[in-house]
Image (cartoon, rainbow, N blue to C red):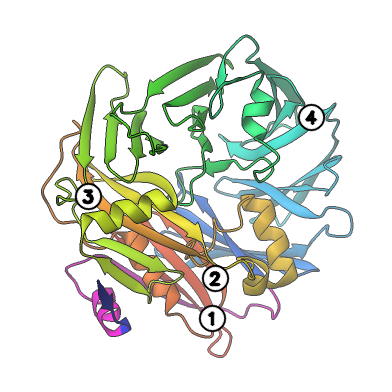
């Protein structure tokens, strides 16, 4: 094992051979005890920095070069509505959706930058024996996705730009759902899990941020056309349920995990990741690791195997262990170390597109810091309130989602035809952004986002009254 020093890491940060970087600095005077989030308008190539205190919201809108083109300040409705549950944008308007903690009321507030006018729509909500799974925005429609308890009936509560509220239903009754060993009776049981699991431990994956290895066995992928539930609870298969957001038809798929011989003492672990309808599956024991890639039509797949005594032939980076910080890295020199640690922890696979290729990250993680919260200590009460409400996962806007975890990982590179490429993968934009964030000092109002094909870290220096956007490209 080789311990990588902080000095070496910082050299990587500024070496031109790793990633392109951009720096934008803006003079701002943000309030003390405030919290900022970013709102991306990809259509118009604009970014809004929303800064909130207990009493007010300040909106700063930036163009693609991070020059301020509009600002607006208004009061918050915190006296009645407890959190922001979603947002949508167009060229002149920003719409925020506020909800009460008991989920009985929804308020949409549309802010017009030019006229400074604010339009409100207030809705009374009724959820009959339902649990709320997720809230999300697609094509400027706000969705509250719920599930009727102890059934397979999903409900989409949809709020359109014109103030219209409608409900669509999708019923999975009659389908089979696969738990660890046996079929479950309904969608509710497979989604919510057992008494030994975190309640509704569902990882939501969208296109506006990179996916880390903090991926559970239950995932929800959201894009502009559909949503897909993915389950890897049974180690022998990945089960997918895709729902069209136009006609609310659905399809179910079962993609088998790689099949290899197991010893009597081996219990396989598995997980998967879906991107561009291609499915990347990882399955392993202490004796073997297999990556299976299935094309979008599920007619073609390729497998890549690694065993402890041989070098991994399909990875394109070092095998790395990270202990809660990019400043605490250990390079794993042997394949058996990587497979053993990956098998001992919670395994995962993730991917993103770089040019025409797929960068795939294999590895696992384990929680190592039970005494800290990844939201409240960083952002304060108001910040934690907004962050959790907007993301439903506290680490989504955290520049380093691995802050409280030990992770092991390696990067692999494949072309669009699923062939392995021999090129070296150094540091991805995601890696570089995390390194940069880990070395920020005395900064507040930190934001983390993807914009114009770059990863950005935003942060505020209270002494200099300056907000900085630092961008990284693969």
Residue ID for mark 1: 443
Nearer the observer: mark 4 or 3; the answer is 3
Check the picture and name the quadrant holding the C terminus.
Answer: bottom left
Let me know if residue 246 appears in the view. no
Q: Earlier in the sequence, mark 3 or mark 1?
A: 3
- Whole-Å distance between the Cαs marked 4 and 3? 47 Å
Residue drawn at point x = 53 percent, y = 63 percent: 398
Q: Is residue 22 above or below residue 91?
A: below
Residue ID for mark 4: 130
Residue ID for mark 2: 446
Secondary structure at badge 4 equals strand
Name the residue nearer the viewer: 282 or 251.
282
- Whole-Å distance between the Cαs marked 1 and 2? 7 Å
Is 108 on the left-hand or right-hand side of 176?
right
Secondary structure at badge 1 equals loop
Labels in figure, total:
4
Name the residue nearer the viewer: 123 or 315.
315
Q: Is residue 228 above or below residue 316?
A: above
Asked if the residue under mark 3 is in contact with the one under mark 2, i.e. CB atoms within 8 Å, the reply is: no
Q: Earlier in the sequence, mark 4 or mark 3?
A: 4
- Whole-Å distance between the Cαs marked 1 and 4? 41 Å
- Whole-Å distance between the Cαs marked 4 and 2? 35 Å
> From which residue to which does the magenta span run?
7-34
Q: Earlier in the sequence, mark 4 or mark 2?
A: 4
Residue ID for mark 3: 308
From the top left corner, tell me how far across and down residue 375 is, in percent.
63, 65
């Amino acid at each position: 094992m080789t311990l990588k020093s902080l000095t070496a890491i910082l050299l990587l940060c500024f070496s031109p051979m790793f990633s392109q970087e951009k720096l934008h600095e803006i003079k701002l005077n943000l309030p003390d005890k405030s919290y900022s989030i970013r709102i991306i308008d990809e259509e118009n190539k604009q970014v809004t920095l929303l800064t909130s205190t207990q009493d007010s919201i300040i909106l700063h809108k930036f163009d693609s070069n991070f020059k301020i083109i509009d600002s607006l300040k208004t009061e918050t409705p915190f006296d009645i509505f407890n959190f922001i549950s979603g947002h949508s944008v167009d060229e002149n308007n920003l719409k925020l959706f506020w909800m009460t903690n008991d989920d009985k009321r929804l308020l949409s507030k549309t802010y017009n930058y030019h006229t400074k006018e604010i339009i409100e729509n207030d809705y009374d909500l009724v959820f009959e024996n339902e649990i709320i799974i997720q809230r999300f925005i697609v094509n400027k429609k706000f969705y509250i996705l719920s599930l009727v308890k102890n059934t397979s009936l999903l409900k989409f509560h949809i709020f359109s730009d014109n103030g219209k509220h409608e409900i669509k239903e999708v019923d999975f009754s009659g389908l089979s759902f696969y738990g660890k060993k046996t079929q479950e009776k309904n969608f509710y049981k497979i989604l919510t899990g057992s008494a030994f699991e975190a309640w509704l431990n569902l990882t939501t994956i969208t296109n506006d941020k990179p996916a880390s290895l903090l991926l559970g066995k239950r995932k929800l992928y959201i894009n502009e056309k559909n949503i897909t539930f993915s389950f890897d609870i049974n180690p022998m298969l990945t089960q997918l349920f895709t729902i069209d957001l136009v006609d609310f038809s659905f399809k179910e798929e079962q993609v088998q995990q790689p099949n290899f011989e197991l010893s009597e003492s081996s219990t396989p672990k598995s997980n998967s990741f879906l991107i561009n309808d291609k499915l990347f599956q990882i399955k392993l024991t202490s004796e073997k690791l297999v990556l299976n890639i299935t094309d979008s039509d599920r007619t073609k797949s390729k497998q890549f195997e690694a065993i402890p005594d041989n070098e991994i032939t399909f990875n394109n980076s070092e095998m790395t262990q990270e202990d809660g910080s990019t400043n605490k890295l250990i390079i794993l020199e042997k394949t058996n170390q990587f497979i053993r640690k990956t098998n001992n922890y919670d395994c995962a696979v993730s991917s993103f597109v770089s040019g025409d290729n797929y960068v795939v990250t294999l590895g696992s993680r384990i929680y190592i810091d039970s005494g800290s919260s990844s939201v409240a200590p960083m952002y304060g009460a108001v910040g934690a309130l907004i962050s959790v409400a907007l993301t439903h996962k506290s680490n989504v806007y955290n520049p380093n989602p691995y802050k409280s975890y030990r992770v092991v990982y390696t990067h692999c590179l494949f072309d669009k035809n699923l062939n392995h490429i021999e090129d070296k993968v150094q540091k991805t934009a995601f890696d570089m952004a995390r390194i940069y964030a880990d070395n920020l000092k005395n900064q507040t109002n930190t934001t983390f986002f993807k914009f114009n094909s770059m990863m950005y870290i935003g942060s505020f220096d209270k002494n200099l009254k300056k907000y900085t956007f630092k961008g990284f490209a693969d």
